[in-house]
Amino acid sequence: MPHLTVYREHDAVRPEVITGDPAVLAGHLAMAGILLERWTAEPVLPADADTAAVLSAYAAPIQRLQRVRGYQSVDVVRMPRGTPDAAALRAKFLDEHTHTEDEARFFVEGSGAFYLHMDGRVFRVVCEAGDLLSVPAGTRHWFDMGPEPHLTAIRFFTRPDGWVAESTGDPISARFPGYEGVVNA
């Protein structure tokens, strides 16, 4: 289940909201234009499952989302525990940036935290297996997979060239607590 922490953008110490309550979480995100859905994260895939196996296992919900939201392509990112160069891969997403298209991710396994910088606040949304999050184009954000990443996610794209980030140059992400692992609310 997802977990939400809301901070004022200038106060990374005292959160305004901390919740795992689905109704409260959905309300906060919906007001901000963020799509959050729960899918069934089944079947559990073997550790050596490749991209084709992941896409095949989730073919029906992938096709539904592509039809409804107009996504043209999908790919799979896998970060098993112990991935070499995990720190460098983590750092790639830690600076605040935007995209010219929605950033949509379905978590097949593992977890990570999206930090959304909107309306004078930072919304930290921790996603776990079964969570689909879509961040609207132009939304300032960053992503933290934690110091020991473990995740498999299906990424959805409207652009044929896929994920393209545009840095905002704002150092805000360095002021907020990093994601350390699964949060249980």
Image: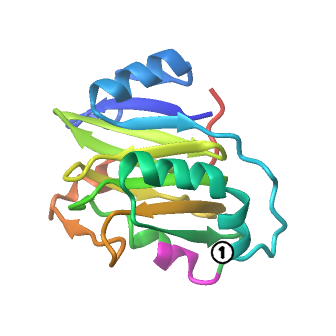
Q: Residue furthest front?
A: 67
Residue 87 belongs to magenta span: yes
In the rendered image, which residue does mark 1 sit on? 51
Query: Where residue 27 sits: x, y (%)?
Result: 39, 19
Q: Residue flagged by tag 1: what amino acid is it? A: Thr
Q: Main secondary structure of the magenta part?
A: helix
Residue 88 belongs to magenta span: yes
Quadrant where the C terminus is found in the figure:
top right
Is residue 98 visible in the rendered image? The answer is no
Query: Where residue 143 sits: x, y (%)?
Result: 41, 56
Query: Which contiguous range is marked in magenta?
Result: 84-89
Nearer to the camera, 74 or 117: 74
Nearer to the camera, 99 or 123: 99
> At numbered mark 1, what does the secondary structure look like: helix, strand or loop?
helix
Question: Residue at (64%, 62%) from the top-left corner?
Answer: 152
Question: Residue at (42%, 71%) from the top-left corner?
Answer: 91
Query: Where residue 35 sits: x, y (%)?
Result: 40, 37
Image quadrant assignment for residue 131: top right
Nearer to the camera, 130 or 166: 130
Mark 1 burial class by Cα count in 10 Å: few <14, some 14-19, many 20+: some
